[in-house]
Image (cartoon, rainbow, N blue to C red):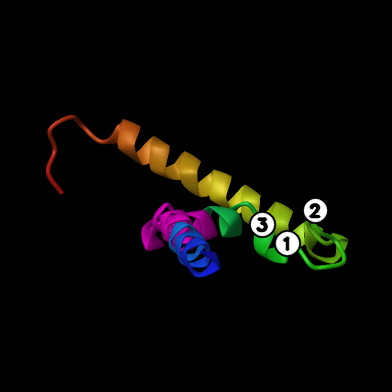
Amino acid sequence: MKKIAFATLSVVVLAASSNVFAQGKTRAEVYQELITAQQNGLDYVTDASYPDVSPVFAHQVEQHKEALAAEAAASRMASESAPAGSVN
């Protein structure tokens, strides 16, 4: 009787664990999260400063965010100034 119960329990545990792995993220989702984290300066988080950015890197993170904002504004201006229907 114990062998049957153990076998049944093993099957249930295996079925449940395989279901958990099937609900994971795709590579594309993880890659996009990594890009977003890098753009937000989270690659400058150290073990000592978690969850905040390390004070050592705070100035670099601020410069990076300003550069991203300037780049976004420049691309927005370029798309607004382009005539409708023009082909490059």
Where residue 57 appears, as percent x and y from the top left, is: 79, 64
Residue occupying image coordinates x 14% and y 38%: 86
Where residue 45 sits, quadrant-wise, is bottom right
- Cα separation between marks 1 and 3: 8 Å
Q: Which mark is residue 60?
A: 1
Given the image, on which type of amino acid does mark 2 rest? Asp
Q: Earlier in the sequence, mark 3 or mark 2?
A: 3
Q: Are marks 1 and 3 in contact (CB under 8 Å)?
A: yes
Residue type at tag 3: Gly
Q: Nearer the viewer, residue 28 or 11?
A: 11
Front tag of 3 and 2? 2
Task: Please report contact status of discs 1 and 2: CB closer than 8 Å, yes or no.
Answer: no
Q: Which residue is rendered at x = 67% and y = 58% of the image?
A: 42
The dot on residue 78 is none
Q: Which residue: 18% across, 29% down?
A: 84
Q: Position of residue 13 (x, y in %)?
A: 50, 60
Read off the magenta span: 13-35
Q: Report the front residue among 19 and 78.
A: 19
The residue carrying mark 3 is 41
The rendered magenta stretch, by its main secondary structure, is classed as helix
Q: Which mark is residue 52?
A: 2
Residue 17 drawn in magenta: yes
Q: Quick check: 52 left or right of 87?
A: right
Please check the rendered image and state whether residue 47 is part of the magenta-colored stretch, yes or no: no
Lower position in the chain sequence, tag 1 or tag 2: 2
